[in-house]
Image (spheres, grey):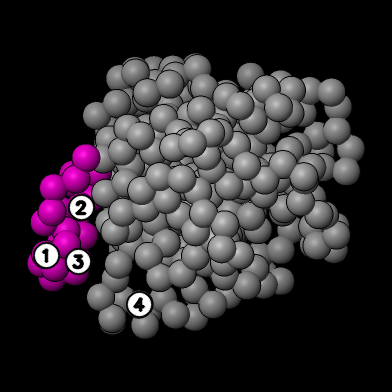
Amino acid sequence: MPLPLRYHLSALLGFAALLTSSCQGNSANSPAGGGLAESLTPDTLEWVGQKTQRLHLRAFRSPKLTSRPTLVVILHGDAPFRPPEYQYTLARQLAATYPNVVAVGLLRPGYTDAQGQQSAGTRGEATGDNYTAAAVDAVAAALRELREHYHAGRVVVAGHSGGAAIAANVLGRYPDRADAALLASCPCDVPRWRSHMLQLEEGKAIWKKSVRSLSPQALVGNVDVTVPITLVVGQADSVTPPRFSWAYWEALHQRRSLAKLVQLPGQGHELFLLPAVRQQIGPLLASR
């Protein structure tokens, strides 16, 4: 699984083994119906949006669907080192694991995947600099179009790291666009998180640049508090430490949201394909 940030060399080496297993989707991370997941083929729909909002995707359907399935849209992290693919893996796993689901792995604006497919927009430098209004608007437009295309009864958005920040920004900028959300390893307070990364990377100049990213923490007052939100973070995550998820969760609770915070013992930043994360997505598919 691609790391969502530019680590210095020692941090990269520390995560090397975890990167390899996560990218390959090994048996430890496979759903109970692993054989079924492998047998699912992508849907014919591969693009959503037009012009500057045209985004690539891979969609997978549960073997049995009603006329009003639940749509799950999955957003990858910042992926500085290799093309993001794990959003497709999780989409396939969710469609195989849960009934009546259309699961979509969405390629974020400006990114290119391993097959050379590229979404429109600006990728940026993978430093939290592309959670911009334009990127958030493109994802929000995709959620609306995908809901209509699949006649979805519910829309759940699930994001990892930078994808979690964009998902949370959608919740704040478009409160009616998703019916539930899972935010994993979220850098929810973007300015403070970038300051944290400046310290983690020993003052690297790239973290001192000004950015135009939206910050979920600043938009939390606009979130519909009736929308179920689950935040998942590894207790050993040094990239987006639990305090960033906790602060966002606390701000939601101050507004009487029923948001849930789940901290996974011993887990670091790369946790999106873990069974524990899929288990947290399950209840969101049927809530409300």
Measuring from the top left, give residue 74's x and y in whole percent: 57, 44
As measured in the structure, the alpha-carbon distance from the residue carrying label 1 to the one carrying label 2 is 11 Å
Marks 3/4: CA–CA distance: 12 Å
**Magenta span includes 256:** no
Q: Amino acid at mark 4?
A: Leu
Q: Amino acid at mark 3?
A: Leu
Determine the CA span between mark 2 and mark 3.
10 Å
Q: Could you tell which of marks 2 and 4 lies nearer the N-terminus? A: 4
User: Mark 3 — residue?
Assistant: 200
Residue density around tag 3, few if under 14, some if 14–19, many if 20 or more, within 10 Å: some
The residue identified by callout 2 is 194
User: Is 195 above or below relative to 229?
Assistant: below
- For mark 2, does the 10 Å Cα neighbourhood hold few (<14), some (14 to 19), or many (20 or more) residues? many
**SS for dot 3:** helix
- Estimate the spatial distance between the alpha carbons at disc 4 and disc 1, rounded to whole Å: 18 Å
Q: Residue at x 85, y 59 (%)?
A: 39
Alpha carbons under labels 2 and 4: distance apart: 18 Å
**Residue contact at pointers 3 and 4, CB within 8 angstroms:** no
Q: Residue at x 51, y 54 (%)?
A: 118
Q: Comparing marks 2 and 3, which lies closer to the viewer?
A: 2
To which residue does mark 4 refer? 12
In the foreground, 114 or 237: 114
Mark 1, residue position:
205
Mark 1–mark 3 distance (CA, rounded to whole Å): 12 Å
Q: Which residues are magenta?
A: 190-212
Query: Badge 4: how crowded within 10 Å, few (<14), some, or many (20+)?
Result: some
